[in-house]
Image (cartoon, grey):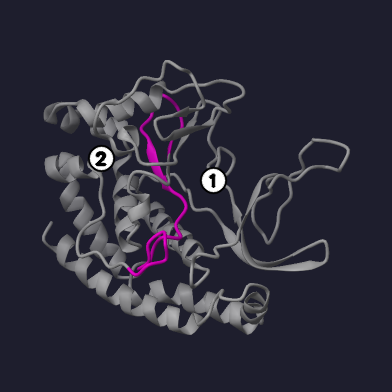
Amino acid sequence: MELIQGADTRETKHVSWLDMPANDNWILDATYVDRSNMRNRVSFDVWNKIQQSSAANGFDVLHSSSLGHFVEVFLNNRYHGLFCLNERLDDVSLQLPETGFLYKSREWSAATLYEGVIPDTSKNLPEWSGWELKFPKPDNEIIWKPLYDFVNFVSNSSSTEFNNNIDSQLTLDQAIDYFIFMNVIQGHDNSGKNLFMAKRSEYEPFYICPWDLDATWGRNWLAEPSLSQSLISFKLFDRLMDLDPEHFNERLSKRWFELRKDVLSHENLLSHFHNYEKQISGSGAVGREKHRWPGALDDIQTEIEYIENWTTQRLSILDGIFGKMQ
């Protein structure tokens, strides 16, 4: 939603809500398909902790965790239920300079999966092969070359070219964090699509930033149970693991076990769910949500228990996989 100064103008108004940075664009996320209502919020909180840890260790990161708070919404004096008020991920929240670029992958395609025949960008439209241009603003200028060159490089470069140049094309520190994060939450829906590619200028490497994280923590986009016994990946990371540039696999394994000590410990991961459950149950919001939308949040305690058991199994699987990469 966009905030404006008044009904008689289209001039936008920047507002800071709940200690979040001021902006004129916000997201009200109903999260109705999520049986816990909190998978997206918890995922971003975990990503934020990972990025804070990386920055503290001197790794190269572009902070890209959307902040958010649970709220209850009334529209024209009518109760509409439990929502999460979230920041957008844009050039403002990412603090991109005017020289920056931001692209969002919206669907699986040859270009978002880095495989198959990559179409050209000659139509000069704000959308290209599953990608959407976010910055520069499409109304001002349409520039696809940085992303096209990267997709073409990952898709078609030789093994030698890939090994010699990937670190100038992609920030490996953040890529390692993203890959770990995507696998902890089991983001099948975030392997190629539902992510942003951002860079500060055409001469700097890309950063991977996550988005749309509700099909996670043991349920797919239809809210069906799901537990993968393997890594979640796509061709970009397949090549990184297969070709192992800059000791990628060793760095990946080392980073995994560093994070497992604190940020990704079983206790710390589940504390996010427990804290939000106390907040929305203790406030009475769960009861009001059920009354307004029968069928919503049928048994949040049972769903939290499901997430607990699923997380135990998923972490054990990943410990085994990443342990073999050492």
- Give left or right: position of 215 versus 135: left
Q: Is residue 270 above or below residue 89?
A: below
- Give left or right: position of 87 versus 247: right
The numbered mark, 1 or 2, whose residue comes first in the sequence reads 1
- What is the quadrant of the C terminus in the image? bottom left
- Marks 1/2 in contact by CB < 8 Å: the verdict is no
Q: Which residues are magenta?
A: 197-225
Q: Is residue 67 above or below residue 142?
A: below
Residue with the most extreme right position: 8
Q: CA distance from mark 1 to mark 2?
A: 22 Å
The amino acid at mark 2 is Leu
Is residue 121 inside the magenta stretch?
A: no
Q: Nearer the viewer, residue 266 or 117?
A: 117
x then y, percent, for residue 310: 32, 74
User: To which quarter of the image does residue 62 belong?
Assistant: top left
Question: How many tags in the picture?
Answer: 2
- Give left or right: position of 73 versus 165: right
The amino acid at mark 1 is Leu
Q: Nearer the viewer, residue 13 or 73?
A: 73
Q: Is residue 266 above or below residue 136?
A: below
User: To which quarter of the image does residue 207 belong?
Assistant: top left
- Disc on res. 89: 1
Please tell me how crowded label 1 is: few (under 14), some (14-19), or many (20+) other residues with Cα within 10 Å. many
- Disc on res. 236: 2
x then y, percent, for residue 275: 52, 77
Please tell me how crowded label 2 is: few (under 14), some (14-19), or many (20+) other residues with Cα within 10 Å. some
x then y, percent, for residue 33: 50, 64
Q: Residue at x 54, y 75 (%)?
A: 276
Query: From this viewpoint, is residue 120 visible?
Result: yes
